[in-house]
Image (spheres, rainbow, N blue to C red):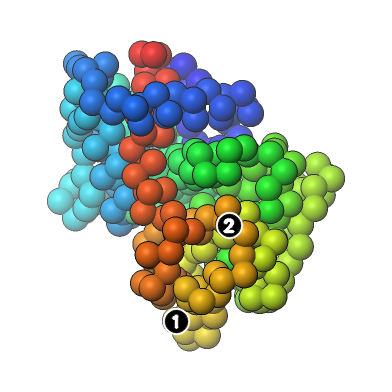
Amino acid sequence: MIGKSLVSINDYTKDEYLKILDLAAKYEKQPKQTILQGYVVATLFYEPSTRTRLSFESAVNQLGGKIIGFSDTGTTSVTKGETLRDTIKIVSNYSDLIVIRHPLEGSARFASEVASVPVVNAGDGANQHPTQTLLDMYSIRKTQGTLDGLNIFMVGDLKYGRTVHSLLMAMSQFKTTFHFISPEELKMPDKYKQHLNDLGLKYHEHKDFTDIISEADILYMTRVQKERFSDPIEYEKVKNVYILKNHMLENTKDSLKVLHPFPRVNEITEDVDENTKAYYFTQALNGVYTRQAIVTSILDLN
Ligand code: CP
């Protein structure tokens, strides 16, 4: 991973996932260091973000590095017609590593091909979100004590949700049994199910999860990705299909944890927040340590 871009979760091996998670655990114990002193990380966000951008920036700041970048292309020369290629080539000369979020699938791969510094994909359209996956894996291992042999329930928008796509690819290396709960219109795409078939892994598709929730180790809730719908009426039909309420967690495993990459809209009612099985706020905090591990590993500083 040294000097290499992280565009797809498949860019890393199973051993590399585990190295990042182990390193993240060290950063959790000591997040404030000077290891990134003298380094500049650029965050180029062509799409809105709260957690990913700010946790990357917090991660770098806490390690003594500097951040440059933008969160609104309206203040940049993109509005004058500058291409992604030119922006990336220019910012390569201003920074040691580029973190990019962009609405187009494949944009981060393209950026990595034209950049002279490593590029980290912070989400490209409905495709992948590999750093989210690493923090999700960190959260899963920390709460379950293992990554192996778990029942992971993925609920909501499995078609457009890039976090579930990356998580499936990574967790398919750990003998996971997947349960996909979605409306017909938002089912897990065939290419991901084919990947599980090729590995001989079990997956089950459901329309509802209330009867089977007692089997879950991880309940991974997701938002319906409004911004990916071309027809607003189609979004209205599916936006509130799954809403997790506190009483629904009554007959679940003691060790169950509820994850959500956030932002949530209506998928989890606020009464769940006080339940000890709700882990999504700590999950977002884990993003700081995991991203510290990712940045410093790529820059070969550990
Ligand atoms: N989880 C996540 O990607 O959140 P943001 O869109 O706020 O970065």
In this view, which residue lies farthest toward the left? 75
User: Can residue 240 be seen from the camera position used here?
Assistant: yes
Q: Is residue 158 above or below residue 285?
A: below
> Quadrant of the rendered structure where residue 95 is?
top left
Q: Going by the image, does 35 lie left or right of 290?
A: left
SS under mark 2: loop
Quadrant location of the C terminus in the rendered image: top left
Q: Position of residue 260 (x, y in %)?
A: 46, 58
Q: Amino acid at mark 1?
A: Pro
> In the image shown, does 224 or 44 lie closer to the viewer?
224
**C-beta proximity under 8 Å, tags 1 and 2:** no
Residue under the point 49% across and 25% down: 22
Q: Residue shown at 45%/49% (left/top)?
A: 124
User: What's the amino acid at mark 2?
Assistant: Asp
Q: Residues within 10 Å of mark 2 (few under 14, many from 20)?
A: few
Q: State left or right for residue 295 relative to residue 105.
A: left
Determine the image quadrant of residue 131: top left
* Residue at mark 1: 232
Q: Which residue is mark 2?
A: 254
